[in-house]
Structures are given as C-alpha cells and as structure tokens.
Image (cartoon, rainbow, N blue to C red):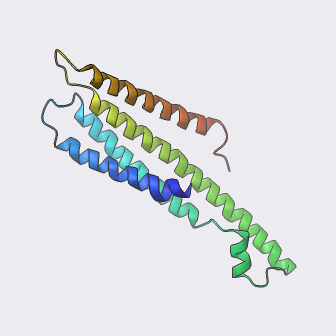
Amino acid sequence: MTTMGNVAAPFLAGFSLTVFVITLTLKEGAARWPDLALLLFMLAAFILIATVQFMFWARHHLVTPRDLMDWYPDWMQPFRRTQLSRYLRVGNGRFRRRANVARVLYGLGLLCLFAGLTILAVPPEVARTPALRWAAVWVGSAATVAEFVWVVLALTSGRLRP
C-alpha cells in the first residue's frame, strides 16, 4: 500500500498529466476522439493524486506496537497497556479504511488512464488503418476491461472492508 501511494500513484498521475498536454498538441484528425481522451487523462490524474492524499491520511494513523513502546516508557503498566491497545486498534482501523479507499481510487485512476490511452489509439476515420493500430486498441481495451473487473472484484469480494 505504501509503495502504491508513494511511488506508483504519483508517477502515474504525472504520466497522465504529460499525456494530457501531449494530446492537446495533436494535429487535427490525428485521433478520433481527442477530447474524450483529454477528459479521461485529467480524471486519471485527479484520481491518482487523490490516491496519494488518502495514503498520506492513512499513514497518519499507522502505528506499530514498537512505536507505542518507544513513545510510552510506562507501556508495561496495566492502565497504559489498555489505553495503548485501544489506540493501536482504533488507529489501525482508521489506517485500513483510508488505505482501502486509496486502493479503490488507484484502480479507478488506472481504469481512466487505460481508457484514455485506448481512446487515443482509435484511428481517425480513414479508408485504410494499419492493423497494428487496431491491435493497440484491442490491447488497450483488454487492459481497461481487466482493470474494471479488478476494481469490481475488489469492491465486491469483501477484501476492502475494515
């Protein structure tokens, strides 16, 4: 989860914004639906940045028993152990909930990115389009569908519940 929020999501958000700007510079007729691709790239960037924000928020609540022992030298006292046990349980529950939101957002961001790249690959209406361009559209469509299924399974499997 930490790698997703610290490395992958920021990298992909930056990539989404880069592709957004590049799409703005395409010549007229270079892509069939560049405006739809622009929308999807901007959505991907926004959602992936939200992923980073939720992971920041989640990590605020992440604490280990070792952290608590270091912070509270009297951790062996019965009243403190009860207090720290509750603190650990509540904090880790908050971490899981926010991290699960970040996980769903990450999947949705990838979904928008794949869809935008696929839409951008659809050739303009011309008499003869290279087969490899259509192969790229097919691969992008498969990746988009796979990510959609992944997000739906993650939401419906119960894995994302605290």
Identified at 18% across, 16% down, the residue is 128
Left or right: residue 101 versus residue 116 is right
Tell me if residue 84 comes above or below residue 4 in the rendering.
below
Q: In which quarter of the image is residue 37?
A: top left
As drawn, the residue found furthest toward the top would be: 127
Tell me if residue 99 comes above or below residue 138 in the rendering.
below
Left or right: residue 56 versus residue 10 is right
Q: Position of residue 79 (x, y in %)?
A: 84, 78
As drawn, the residue found furthest toward the right would be: 78
Tell me if residue 65 comes above or below residue 9 in the rendering.
below
Identified at 42% across, 49% down, the residue is 47
- Asked whether 22 or 155 is in front, the reply is 22
Q: Position of residue 19 (x, y in %)?
A: 27, 45
Left or right: residue 32 versus residue 70 is left
As drawn, the residue found furthest toward the left would be: 28
- Asked whether 79 or 11 is in front, the reply is 11
Identified at 13% across, 36% down, the residue is 27
